[in-house]
Image (spheres, rainbow, N blue to C red):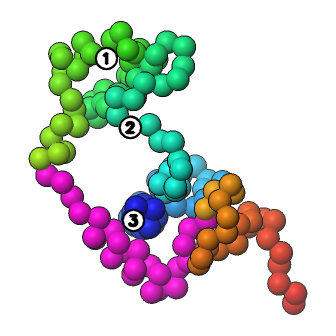
Amino acid sequence: MRAAAVALARELERRRPDLLTAAWWKEERGNRVFVDYNQNAPHKTVFGPWAVRARVGGQVSTPLGWDEVPTVVPDEFTLATVPGRLVALGDPWAAMHAAPQSLEPLLEWSARDLAAGLQDAPWPPVYPKQPNEPLRVAPSRARKPDR
């Protein structure tokens, strides 16, 4: 899954380099949005839809429609409010189950990138060094080769 996520992040960056980036190091991102492939690393605790957060207020991870994004107030989605919302509006993600997609195209992109000489993307610092992973040091702190 992580290889597919890295490939997707890189492809999105290729298509919209002005807006999106797969650059792990903040100093390389500028004002672009980082597509965080490392949320697919083992043992990550990403919240799924309808998961209750361990916070005072009982906020719920709630799927939204795109039209809601500009005005959403996340703290308003709670154990008390989400069941009524679901009954009134339905699940905005329900339709995606009717047309499941394959990861194969993303895995092909991953193989293409590796064949073209790209290494794996950097892993979070809490993980041991992975095979084919680039140096885990910010570019500004990397040792410069002797000239």
Q: Amino acid at mark 2?
A: Gly
- Please tell me whether residue 110 belongs to the stretch shown in magenta: yes
Q: Which residue is mark 2?
A: 48
Q: Give me the C-alpha separation between circle 3 and circle 2.
A: 18 Å
- Please tell me whether residue 26 belongs to the stretch shown in magenta: no
Give percent across and percent down for residue 37. Answer: 49, 57
Disc nearest the viewer among 3 and 2: 2
What quarter of the picture does the N terminus occupy? bottom left
Left or right: residue 138 versus residue 9 is right
Q: Give me the C-alpha separation between circle 3 and circle 1.
A: 32 Å
**Image quarter for residue 123?**
bottom right
Query: At numbered mark 1, what does the secondary structure look like: helix, strand or loop?
Result: helix
Query: At numbered mark 3, what does the secondary structure look like: helix, strand or loop?
Result: helix
Q: Which badge, 3 or 2, is on the more N-terminal residue?
A: 3
Give percent across and percent down for residue 141. Answer: 81, 65
Q: Amino acid at mark 3?
A: Ala
> Farthest top residue?
80
What quarter of the picture does the C terminus occupy? bottom right
Within-10-Å neighbours for mark 3: few <14, some 14–19, many 20+: many
Q: Give me the C-alpha separation between circle 2 and circle 1.
A: 15 Å
> Farthest bottom residue?
147
Q: Which residue is mark 3?
A: 4
Query: At numbered mark 2, what does the secondary structure look like: helix, strand or loop?
Result: loop
Residue in the picture at 48% in, 25% down: 53
Q: Which residue is mark 1?
A: 82
Residue in the picture at 67% in, 64% down: 128
Q: Amino acid at mark 1?
A: Val
Within-10-Å neighbours for mark 2: few <14, some 14–19, many 20+: few
Give percent across and percent down for residue 139. Answer: 73, 67
Q: Which residues are magenta?
A: 99-122
> Farthest left residue?
98
